[in-house]
Amino acid sequence: MAADEGSVRVDSWIWSVRLTKTRSLAASACRAGHVRVNGERVKPAHAVRPGDQVRLRIAGRERIVVVSRLVRKRVGPAVAADCFIDHSPPPPAREEIAVAGDRDRGAGRPTKRDRRELDRLRGHPPQ
C-alpha cells in the first residue's frame, strides 16, 4: 500500500488520497491546467515526491497540500489524511455561496426576462 521510495504519478496520487472522486477526473484536471506541482502546471504523468506542494483547483475551490507520504492505490479517509499536510483556505460558508436561478417548482420555463436576469447574476455579458 505505501510506496515510501521513488515517485508516483500526480493523477494517481491525487485520486489515491481522495482529493478527486475518480482518477479520470484527476487526469482531466491536470490536462486542463488545474493542477500545479511546486508552482508549475503539470501533465497527469508528472511524478510527485514527498515534500512537493500540490495545488488543485476543483469544484470552484483551491486545495493546497504538501505531499508527506506516497501511495499508489486508493486508501481510506483516515490513511489519506496522513498522506498530506493540508494548507488549503477554509471553504466559504454556505451563506456566502450565491444561489442563482432558484425557481419555484411548477413555475414553467423561464421567460426571456428571467434568462437575462440569470445571465446577469452569473456574470455573462448580454448577447
Image (cartoon, rainbow, N blue to C red):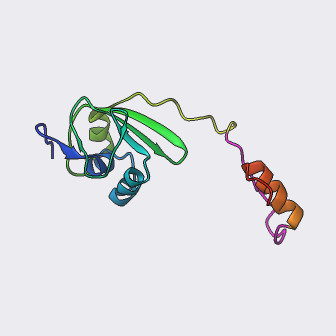
Picture coordinates of residue 35 (x, y %)? 39, 44
Magenta residues span: 97-110
How many numbered circles are shown? 0
Q: Residue at x 69, y 37 (%)?
A: 95
Q: Is residue 111 magenta?
A: no
Q: Position of residue 66 (x, y in %)?
A: 32, 31
* Relative depth, front residue between 1 and 114: 114
**On the rendered image, what quadrant is the C terminus found in?**
bottom right
Name the residue at 41% across, 52% down. Answer: 29
Q: Quadrant of residue 28?
A: bottom left
| Above or below, comparing residue 23 to residue 56 in the picture | below
Q: Quadrant of residue 97?
A: top right
Left or right of 42, for residue 109: right
Q: Is residue 16 above or below residue 55?
A: below
Q: With respect to residue 102, does 52 lie above or below?
A: above
Is residue 124 found left or right of 114 in the rendered image?
A: left
Magenta portion: prevailing SS class? loop
Q: Residue furthest left?
A: 5
- Which residue lies at the image location 48% right of the left edge and 38% below the top edge? 62
| Residue 125 locus on image (x, y percent) | 76, 53
In the displayed orientation, state which residue is furthest to the front: 127
Percent x, y for residue 57? Answer: 47, 43
Task: Check residue 99 for magenta coloring.
Answer: yes
